[in-house]
Image: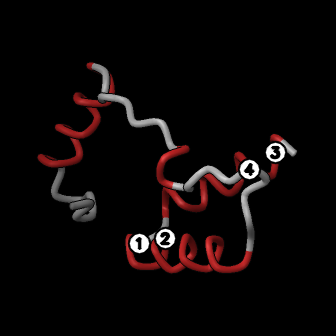
Amino acid sequence: MIVVKEKIKTLVDVMPMNEAENLLTYIISNFQLKSNVDLWDSIEEIEPDEIDKQIMHEMEIDPDCNDFS
């Protein structure tokens, strides 16, 4: 199961934003969580660490990167 979850995470990371939103909409409308927890409430939000910030900065200044905003 972990391999499947990792593949899904990787897929979503490389998808264009609109396709990722479509996938999320599909998942929400076709699958139920096992608990009554709201999907968005169950996602933990964390602040980016220094490595994340460095990667985001490098993406912003690299002309070969896509626009991720």
Amino acid carrying label 1: it is: Pro
Give percent across and percent down for residue 43.
Answer: 51, 44
How packed mark 4 is, by other alpha carbons closer than 10 Å (few <14, some 14-19, many 20 or more), is few
How far apart, in angstroms, are the residues tagged by discs 4 and 3? 23 Å
Q: Quadrant of the C terminus?
A: bottom left
65 above or below 50? below
Q: Quadrant of the N terminus?
A: top right
Residue at x 23% of width, y 46% of height? 59
Secondary structure at badge 4 equals: loop
Secondary structure at badge 3 equals: helix
Amino acid carrying label 4: it is: Ser
Residue at x 62% of width, y 71% of height? 28
Give percent across and percent down for residue 39.
Answer: 56, 56
* Label annotation for residue 3: 3
Q: Nearer the viewer, residue 51 or 5?
A: 5
Instruction: Return the disc, 3 or 1, that comes first in the chain's sequence.
Output: 3
Instruction: From the image, tell me which residue sits under label 2.
Output: 20
Give percent across and percent down for residue 63.
Answer: 16, 57
Instruction: From the image, tell me which residue sits under label 4.
Output: 35
Q: Nearer the viewer, residue 37 or 8?
A: 37
* Label annotation for residue 16: 1
Looking at the rendered image, the disc whose residue lies closer to the viewer, 2 or 1, is 2
Instruction: Return the disc, 4 or 2, that comes first in the chain's sequence.
Output: 2
Locate residue 51 relative to residue 2 in the image: left or right: left
Residue at x 72% of width, y 57% of height? 33
